[in-house]
Amino acid sequence: MNVRSRVSPLNRTNAGAPPAAPVRIVHIGLGAFHRSHQAWYTERADPNNAWGIAAFTGRSPEAADILAAQDGLYTLVERGDDGDEFGIMCRISAAYDGGDLAQLTKVLSAPETSLLTITITEPAYHLGMDGLLNPQSAAVASDTAALKDMWASSGSLEVEGDYPQLTTMGARVLPGLDARRRRNAGPIAVVSCDNLTSNGSAACQAIQGLASLVSAELCEWIQANVSFVDTSVDRITPRTTEADATAVREATGFDDAAPVITEPFSSWILSGEFPAGRPAWENAGALFVNDIVPFEQRKLWLLNGAHSLLAYAGQLRGLRTVSDAVADPSCAAELEAFWDEAAAHLDHPELNTQAYRAALLNRFRNTRIEHLLEQIGIDGTTKLRMRAVPVLIAERSAGRTGEGSARIIAAWAAFLLHRQENGARPVDAEAQRLSDILKLSGRDLTKALVTTLNADLGADTNVVDLVHRLRGSW
């Protein structure tokens, strides 16, 4: 008998789940990571079922349609070397298409809503290399014009009927915050959960920075009533395969169209104010600190930087997953060399960098987590600015070559060139810029790519020579 014919649809009735919790959290970016991380922490921290999440997709409405049909429920599979643990997650109370701005405005402006959490990936903040909102971005410019027209016509960002087409996260959020202002619904905290240094500041730029271009009145209200919380997030969450979905059906007896696969490890470190309250996430293992910067750097450099190195060096060697790459002697040696450089600049006493490195190796070696190098390698331009460039700059400032971190940039350059030679465009938010650079050759190409990541490094002859030499090793 076919497995699908022996299972039941996943919903609250069939699963014996509690009723949907009252919505107090709005989330933007309804992907697997949110469901393995923030939703999981909220589930574990809230036994009284008091904190429900209204989750909106970032782009396609597909995930919202699937989860809405399942009453927000999904299976979380914690996949360790010794087996799988299956759990039904109930914390998402409602799932919506991210393009439904009327619904987003409604839930954001509700007095009961205390938090807005975000997972939209790094490029979607539309920041320039200075860390500020980039008004020259086509998406930002288009949204700014549309919001200005809305404000000019009515003195607010609420509209009767259909909203205009808005594409950036900041633009989609502003009508809800403006409605919150007009209804005296109280303060709210914005919690970014993306892999950005000072991601709270990034969220502030995406939201408040955009408001400053539209309305001084709204911008002032946001300054007084919206807090932006910095976080460091960590849980490897690969894409779910059809084989994974079949395993879930066999293990649980439910036909789950949206299961999530993740590792047993999880980490969430937060720093900031929550003026309208929050779940007791610390009861689920979250850590609240006054200074998050050292923890951000440890994670971005040692975990994310390692992932980027393995993504490019591994694919150039014909490897497919993180576990494949760390098992390769050359990749492993390059990883340790980069880690040595990064660790030299991670001296906060609470970081325990050596133990963190050892734990990362064990996580990377988990062969049952298929973390695809191809997936990790997407949007390298944005990622390397945060993962490789700071370590290289720190090493050069210390009088050392920075070869370990320069190798990440070299591997990225070689990988881009390899893809171009095989007729594939870069999968990157700055794909057109990279495609134009890849028309160059030799050292000119290397210099242009380094400059794209950091103008000062691109102007340093020794750095460009180093990256160019390393690029030639593939």
Image (cartoon, rainbow, N blue to C red):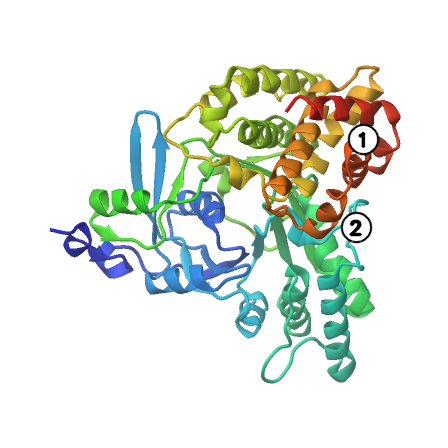
Q: How crowded is mark 1: few (under 14 residues within 10 Å), some or many (20 or more)?
A: some
Q: How crowded is mark 2: few (under 14 residues within 10 Å), some or many (20 or more)?
A: some
Q: Tell me, for residue 217, which label it has, or none.
A: none
246 and 89: which one is in front? Answer: 246
Q: Which residue is drawn at 50% across and 37% down?
A: 282
Query: Where in the figure is residue 459, as x and y percent of width and height?
Result: 88, 32
Residue at mark 1: 443
Q: Is residue 465 above or below residue 84?
A: above
Query: Where in the figure is residue 435, as x and y percent of width and height?
Result: 71, 47
Distance from the alpha carbon under mark 2 to that under mark 1: 31 Å
Q: Which residue is drawn at 21% across and 44% down?
A: 250
> Is 167 placed left or right of 59 in the picture?
right
6 and 428: which one is in front? Answer: 428
Query: Where in the figure is residue 214, as x and y percent of width and height?
Result: 79, 69
Q: Check the picture and name the quadrant holding the C terminus.
A: top right
Among the 4 quarters of the image, the one containing residue 223: bottom right
Q: What is the three-letter code of the residue carrying label 2?
A: Leu
